[in-house]
Image: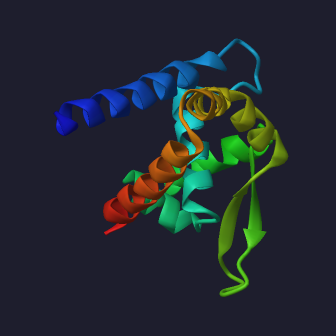
Amino acid sequence: MLENEFERLYFKFRDNYCKNLFSGVDEKDESLTPTESYCVEVIFLLDHPTVREFADYVNISQPNATYRINSLIHKGYIRKIVSERDKREYNLEVTDKFLNNYGVKATFNSDLMNGIKNKFSKEEVDLLEKMIKKIVDEIMV
């Protein structure tokens, strides 16, 4: 049944995300806590949000968001950029340090894509790509 198979797929992605969320946690001052990993991931996915947009998205107060952002800046995972729209605001941007770390954690996706390309025909891969685009568009509605 489609619903069951889609749920299995979704759980596999969630499982991978949860494993990776804790994988970088160690005793070093610059490692990210799971909460910090989640916050920097949200900032990445929101694509240059303001502090307010980030706070609203994760449903926390602006002072709490500022505290978390300052910790991520101190650890070198994000930076503040003066907003072009309103010079009194800042947009948040992930750094190369995050992108390099994020890329390492994305090996699951890379391995999955390589497996799909090796196990399916070109026509099946093209069809899957079209279907995924439609699914993403449906989710965005």
Please tell me which residue is depicted at 20% across the width and 30% down the height of the picture.
4
Q: Position of residue 83 (x, y in %)?
A: 71, 78
Please tell me which residue is depicted at 40% across the width and 54% down the height of the picture.
131
Q: Does residue 30 appear left or right of residue 140 in this picture?
A: right
Q: Position of residue 60 (x, y in %)?
A: 40, 52
Residue 90 quadrant = bottom right
Please tell me which residue is depicted at 67% across the width and 68% down the height of the picture.
91
Q: Does residue 1 appear left or right of residue 95 in this picture?
A: left
Seen in the picture, residue 103 relative to 16 is either above or below; the reply is: below
Specify whether residue 91 is in view: yes
Q: Residue furthest bottom?
A: 85
Residue 27 quadrant = top right
Count up the numbered dots.
0
Specify whether residue 60 is in view: no
Q: Position of residue 87 (x, y in %)?
A: 72, 84
Q: Residue furthest right?
A: 96
Q: Nearer the viewer, residue 106 or 67?
A: 106
Q: Quadrant of the C terminus?
A: bottom left
Seen in the picture, residue 66 relative to 36 is either above or below; the reply is: below
Q: Nearer the viewer, residue 33 or 15?
A: 15
Q: Residue furthest top?
A: 27
Q: Does residue 120 appear left or right of residue 117 in this picture?
A: left
How has the structure been colored for display? rainbow
Seen in the picture, residue 82 relative to 101 is either above or below; the reply is: below
Q: Quadrant of the N terminus?
A: top left
Please tell me which residue is depicted at 72% across the width and 24% down the height of the picture.
31
